Image (cartoon, coloured by chain):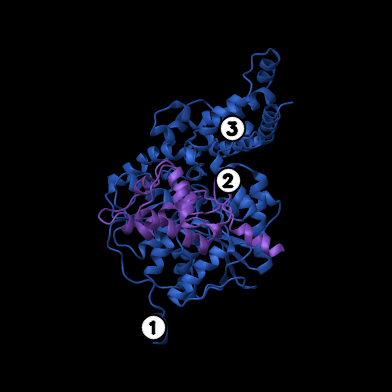
Amino acid sequence: MSTGTLNISKGINALKEQIDAPTAAFFSSCVHCGLCAEACLFYTETNDPKYTPINKVEPLRRIWESEYTLFGRLKKVLGLAKPVTDEMLQEWEPLVYDACTLCGRCSMVCPVGNDISTMIRKVREGMVASDHAPEGLIGASTRAVKIGSPMGIRLKALKAQIGHIETDTGLTIPIDVEGADYLALLSSMEIINFPEYIESLAKIFKQAGVSWTLSSEAFEATNSGIQIGSSDIARELVQRVVEGAEKLKVKYVISPECGHAYTAIRWDGPNLIGREYPFKVVHILELLDELQQSGRFKTSGLLEKRLTFHDPCQLVRKGGVEAQPRRLLAQISSQFVEMTDSGKMNWCCGGGGGVSANERADDIRLKVFNRKKAQLEEIDIEVMVTACANCRLVLEEGLEENNMDIPVIGLSELISEHLVEENAVKGENNE
Amino acid sequence: MLNQNKGADLKNLDLNKKGYLIHFEAWNKDFANNMAESNGLKLTECHWHVIDFLREYFQEFGIAPDAREVIKKLGKKINPNTPCSRKHLEGLFANGGCKLACKIAGLPDCHCRGV
């Protein structure tokens, strides 16, 4: 048996394993209306019907039909069924990896309630098993498993950044503090591109009196397994965080300004490892909102520039974190404007779900950025705020490509810039 | 004996399968010039700013910086009059971009993307 034949049979088996009751119900419910096409920026910005979300799951549909429906079995017996072949998976690979950010917008519009985005995630399991994942994501997943970070970041890099922050600010960044209430996770991009996030946490938590720590063994929040579509890798990466949190006996784990990390640790995690966590998971925006509502930290001054908030798909659609960033922004901004389709129907930056890690997808990613560009042109803003380091980098690149001079800032960072100086808070309390 | 062998290895300018220098410490300017030349590139002062930065950054963080970091730190040195863009940086190391820059700077690997 050749390797190719072996891989395709592994792929088909992996796809078969993905067909659970909801998936079967989704396929039998599809009314072929095509509404999901209009919800997908890869279709709206290219007008190419192959990017219709439901078409991206065709390999899985064929397996479902030929294995789990009477009519499909009959067709198979009569030799009329279209089989899933290695060539087919090769053809579908760019559809499910380069042209889908797992943003979930298609699932929102489906009139019969099919969760198409989750089905595409399932197709990726078959792609991985049959060796049809893109090089960029294979590299990221390999580094995540071997080194602990998709970008290849080791503890040395985190410690170097912590050193810079501590020297520059005089703040202490706690690491491996057993018994702290909160364990803060970080994305590799925050460590390398946006260390301001770490500094912001330290400033805000100091004022709010939050007992927190980082872990030298479990600092990475991102989960390449979720992106490439390998539950085995996803499980291992979640397990590392769980072990790190258990070792430090924390009560809460904070998911950082990263979209898919929240999906991984908050929603998929317990199912992946097959048990409940002995701690709770909160997103940083949920925590900051709670701290602000209870008066644990104070901000002053309103940013007078016109600004908008780009909702990271995984936070708003899959996580329901929608009101929190708006409440937080209301405290520090006087000119907040919503984009059309903001909140739960916001359009993706174009780089989620592993697309930005996949070099082959660069051209289409920049093309579909036209959707975000159109959203921004309608509201004429000066500053863009978001809460996902990957969105931030993708937005920055898209804006640069389109000669749009709009800075993109992380919400936690913006809040920390407006934090009332600690001495002032103490003085006020003493009065 | 073991140490001597180790010392000899560290000066070895062998490349790995992907074409990167195996031993970061073995790098020297001649190596950079030769690597550039074999890729049809003549190094200018501007290239050297990037190469020096790549080496310093790798030394500190253990990974290669992405284009954003290079532009943030060196933008004005690379392009003093207009804002330095990713395209400008890629153009500096034509026919290879980030990967070629890392090869010339003697970094052992470089994936050139954020994730």
Q: State the image quarter where residue B97 is shown.
A: top left
Question: Is disc 1 in the same subunit as disc 2?
Answer: yes
Label number found at residue A26:
3
| Whether residue A29 is situated above or below residue A398 in the rendered picture | above
Residue tagged by mark 1? Answer: A428
Which chain can be seen in blue? A
Label 1, secondary structure: give it: helix
Which chain can be seen in purple? B
Q: x and y percent of residue A167 in the render? A: 46, 75
**Neighbour tally class for label 1: few under 14, some 14-19, many 20 plus, Cα within 10 Å:** few
Q: Amino acid at mark 2?
A: Gly
Which residue occupies the extreme left position in the image? B81
Residue A345 appears anywhere in the view: yes
- Residue closest to the eye, A79 or A401: A401
Residue tagged by mark 2? Answer: A139
Q: Is residue A148 left or right of residue A169?
A: right
Q: x and y percent of residue B41 in the render? A: 40, 45
